[in-house]
Image: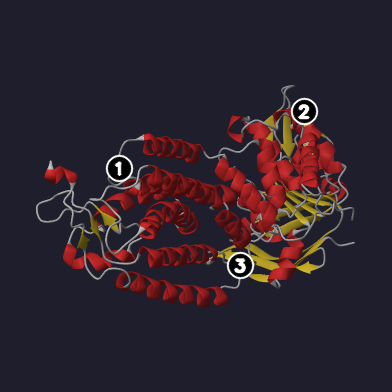
Amino acid sequence: MTTARLEGVSKSFGRTRVLQPVTLDLHPGVVGLLGPNGAGKTTLLRLLASVLPPSSGRIEVAGQDVTGTHAERTEARRRIGYLPQEVVFPRGMTAFGFLDYVAVLKEWRDTAARHAEVRRVLGLVQLGEGATRRVARLSGGQRRRLAIAQALIGAPELLLLDEPTTGLDPEQRASLRGILSGLPGTVLISTHQTEDVSALCDRVVVLDRGAVRFDGSVPDLLATAAGRVYVGPEANVDAVTTWKTGTGRIHSVGGRPLPGAGPVPPSVEDAYLLLRGSSTDHQGARS
Amino acid sequence: MNTVTATQNSTLGPLARQEIRNYLRSRLFWVGAALLALMSYVGLTGPDDRFSTVGDGLVPAAVIGLLGIIVMAGMTRNSDRAAAAAGAVAVPQRTRTLALASAVVVPATAGLLWFATAIVGYHLHPPAADAIPFGPVGDGFVYAGMFVEGVMACIGGPVLGLVIGRWLPGRGVAPVVAVVLVPVTIVMQPLFESVEQWRVFWVWVHFYGPVGVDGDADRAAILTGSPYLHIAYLAALCVLGVLVALHRDPESDRSRLRTAILGVVAVAAVLAVLSMLGGEDERVPNPIPSSSATS
């Protein structure tokens, strides 16, 4: 079952094209969206959330054409939960009051049902005790969890999360993974945290310079890096990147190993770096 | 997909209730309301029997109306922030704008309460013979004047705040407008008799008062124009303000809204002219000199 579909969707701001024509199908499950800053991840999420109109192409969410009529767009929005990268909260509201207001904006008309839903999502993000506190008095991590909570209102079919774990401590990140992995719908997470992707996602999409560089499962992404990551006394020749580990040995991603180096199982980060390195090399060779 | 089902009926009602609660939570509103209550108490218990509550219309206009500009602009900004925090929500901006406009019921109620208190005060301390009303006008004229100055300002201020919140959402704009309104309003009062009729186009004008005649600086006079029609003119401006605020929603069909705006502009213009031509043609001083002139 397809939750969302992008067909040849591109986006330009003036003369700057931030998203090349992209075609993607999203199915139930957790999808990780990786890419460097400026790759077009946030733009892709905002297009799916119908915050931005595409420059070309067609976007469908839960069978509704987001780029179609106002009625279709509204119907699609009823199925979407969206966490923007940066959230500016209303002044003077409590955590509960903020979520209550957003729930009304999401058409939760019945007061008792709405309050129950607000309490549910507050509990999910472990903010039940901070419900009556003003948002301005919450810590950065609590505010981030509050922002996540608003996206979870109504258990949306398509949940779009832009950098959800920014500002969360390890326990809170683990807790969020638990929440997201238990959701029945489609979750698209834009992140720089490759460990979140490896721990949570069953599919990875890598965006670079507005184009999809990889679209597949986590094992498939790892397979692209198999035998290309080494640990040894010295850095590989022409490695994409290297660093000294805590044991004093050198971790090399890509390149040719020198004597004494041995291959190690790649992580998602290694695979991503290799993918990025090869695309940069390719770009460099072309230019 | 096991989506929790939200009730998808009109959300204007619950959203309007939220905005009314938000207005009632505003500290600025309660500061104004407390000042208004204090001034009303002073008006009720004070010994003044000359102009009675006539001059007090300025109090609700200032502490509820002017402050309402800031309160409503802030509420509009908060509504936009909440909507932006959730990304794209199903409820359109025009519904949020209408809900915000509904919250005007709070300052309007404060204005009406003041009005009721002012009428009680008016009868507890009837105006002296050298005050207003006299001759061609009666109590209704004074009531209409108080309604124009007090109640309509309590409604018009927050509506202006809504327009500012929609079109000029910067944080400092509403306070600056509230401050600038004061000197402009002073200038728009009948300082010059020859252009007195034109003042009714402004939103906050007197129709009577101690304007001074023939060396009697406190001599009461009835000014030109009709306060009854001016109420209708200001009501049209309030409707116009809401429509202009609604017009900001880029996703709504604005063609019919534009027609409605043009229609209300025409109605407001006609009412302004009628307000100018209605009532007295020229200033009518009270034949009885003021007590300060005779003492």
Total labels: the figure holds 3
Which residue position is annotated with label 2? Answer: A171
Q: Earlier in the sequence, mark 1 or mark 3?
A: 1
Q: Does residue A257 appear left or right of residue B46 in this picture?
A: right
Asked if B84 appears above or below A71 in the picture, the reply is above
Q: Nearer the viewer, mark 1 or mark 3?
A: 1
Corner quadrant of residue B11 = bottom right
Which residue corresponds to the image point at 38% horizontal and 35% vertical from the top-left?
A: B45
Distance from Cα at disc 1 to Cα at disc 3: 56 Å
Amino acid type, label 1:
Asp
Q: Quadrant of the N terminus of chain B?
A: bottom right
Q: Picture coordinates of residue B77 (x, y %)?
A: 53, 49
Circle 1/circle 2 CB separation < 8 Å: no
Q: Are marks 1 and 2 on the same chain?
A: no
Q: Chain of mark 1?
A: B
Q: Does residue A86 appear left or right of residue B120 in this picture?
A: right
Distance from Cα at disc 1 to Cα at disc 2: 72 Å
Corner quadrant of residue B275 = bottom left
Depth check: give the residue in front, B279 or B123. Answer: B123
Amino acid type, label 3:
Glu
Depth check: give the residue in front, B158 or A118. Answer: B158
Q: Nearer the viewer, mark 2 or mark 3?
A: 3
Q: Chain of mark 2?
A: A
Within 10 Å of disc 2 (Cα), the crowding (few <14, some 14-19, many 20+) is few
Q: Nearer the viewer, mark 1 or mark 2?
A: 1
Within 10 Å of disc 3 (Cα), the crowding (few <14, some 14-19, many 20+) is few
Q: Picture coordinates of residue A205 (x, y %)?
A: 77, 53
Which residue position is annotated with label 1? Answer: B49
Which residue position is annotated with label 3? Answer: B251
Amino acid type, label 2:
Glu
Depth check: give the residue in front, B41 or B66. Answer: B41
